[in-house]
Amino acid sequence: MHLLASSQLQLAGSMTVIRLSLHVLAATVWVGGQFVLAGMLPTIRGLGEGAPKKMAQAFGRLSWPAYWLLIATGVWNFIAVDPANASSSWNAAFGIKMVCVIAAGLGTFLHTRAKTPKARGIYAGIGALASIAALVLGIAIAG
């Protein structure tokens, strides 16, 4: 348990609540949705030959806006940070998170364009692992 010696915990301001709520909501769609869709894939395949592609396209209509909302609220989060209070480890974790965010988007994009099952699997794995890493690093840098 963390005890504060000189101050009490206080509620976040309304703009902070909005900013972080949008960021977390977008992450639930982007990251969580990938795992929900992957878990449903055996059932989706049973619905017919074109079903996986249709489901992936439907998910893309939700997940890509969520990805771009993550980018926008991530920029907003960064602007809200006082650089004078950022340690070198925070800056390093932030930089690694940005690499993971780019890798998540790129891996997922390449997954949608892949022509072979092997390539789809590799790119899906890159997108998913990078998404998880970005999520964990986001929690770490939130303090």
Image (cartoon, rainbow, N blue to C red):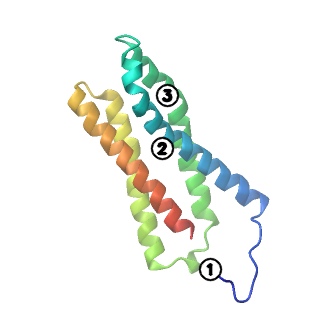
From mark 3 to mark 2, how far is it between C-alphas?
12 Å
Q: Residue at x 61, y 73 (%)?
A: 82
Going from the N terminus, do you reach mark 3 or mark 1 first?
1
Res 117 visible: yes
Residue 121 placement, left or right of 81: left
Res 102 visible: no
Q: Which mark is residue 59?
A: 3
From mark 3 to mark 1, how far is it between C-alphas?
40 Å
Badge 1: few (under 14), some or many (20 or more) residues near its Cα, within 10 Å? few
Check disc 1 and give the amino acid type: His
Q: Residue at x 37, y 38 (%)?
A: 108
Quadrant of the frame with the N terminus: bottom right
Q: Nearer the viewer, mark 2 or mark 1?
A: 1
Badge 3: few (under 14), some or many (20 or more) residues near its Cα, within 10 Å? some
Check disc 2 and give the amino acid type: Val
Q: Nearer the viewer, mark 3 or mark 1?
A: 1
Q: Which residue is mark 2?
A: 31
From mark 2 to mark 1, how far is it between C-alphas?
29 Å
Badge 2: few (under 14), some or many (20 or more) residues near its Cα, within 10 Å? many
Going from the N terminus, do you reach mark 3 or mark 2 first?
2
Q: Secondary structure at mark 3?
A: helix
Residue in the foreground of this view, choosing between 95 and 123: 123
Q: Quadrant of residue 26?
A: top right
Q: Residue at x 61, y 69 (%)?
A: 81
Residue in the foreground of this view, choosing between 36 and 83: 36
Q: Secondary structure at mark 2?
A: helix
Q: Secondary structure at mark 1?
A: loop
